Amino acid sequence: MRYLLEKAGNYVLAYIYENIQKGVDAKGNPFAYSKRPFYRPYNQALYKKMGGASGYGKLFTITQSKGGRLGFIIMGYDAFKQAVYPGSYGSFLTVTGKLLRSMKVTSVNDSRAVIGFTGTRNQLIATYLNETGAGRGRKLWQFLGIRPEQFVDLNKQLSPEANEYYKGLLGEIVRRLDTTR
């Protein structure tokens, strides 16, 4: 049974990656970047990536806290990602790729397979995206899970092996019952 559950876990991982590549969550809803303004502490390198003076007023404004610290008000993550990470704009959850590379079948026993993340930081990011939500609006990016049609396909893929496994178990039970008579 462990072998079947490990195989199922790997299929589910493949389905999750497929969903992310298509830009949809576990329910089939499309991912979308926020267009709401957000705050980010000032950083000179980030200022340059956002176009410097040419980005001011279009992509961001600079603000100062009461304590004198500089920060950006960025005009939405959608515009921010287009400007700062143009190569990964259409690819969701893949700015660095660390989170998805750390996603694995972390444990398997006779009753379940667990998909998790290696590294505490990646575990926290996954929890943040899937359970608590991103940003002030707490928007969920529920990428863990599979769509109903993928579940049907998973059953179709694993049914022949599962049937053989259970036939073997039933055969063993029948053999034991025959020897006890």
Image (cartoon, rainbow, N blue to C red):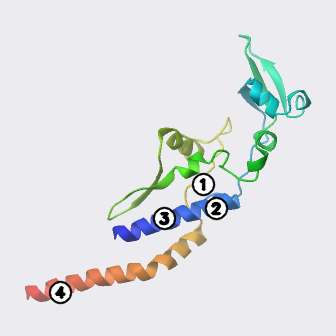
Q: Is residue 27 visible?
A: no
Q: Nearer the viewer, residue 125 or 25?
A: 125
Type of residue at label 1?
A: Phe
The answer to whether the residue labelled 1 contacts the one labelled 2, judged by CB atoms less than 8 Å apart, is yes
Q: Are the residues at dot 2 and dot 3 in contact (C-beta closer than 8 Å)?
A: no
Front position in the image: 69 or 173: 69
Q: Mark 4 and mark 3: span between their CA atoms?
A: 33 Å
| Circle number at residue 143 | 1
Element on which disc 1 rests: loop
| Mark 4 residue type | Arg
Marks 1 and 4, Cα distance to the nearest angstrom?
45 Å
Q: Is residue 122 visible?
A: yes
Find residue 57 and report its horizontal and vertical position in percent. Answer: 90, 29
Residue 175 marker: 4
Query: Between marks 1 and 2, how big is the CA–CA gap?
Result: 8 Å
Q: Give the mark nearest the N terminus, 1 or 3.
A: 3
- Upstream in the sequence, badge 2 or badge 3? 3
What kind of element bears circle 4? helix
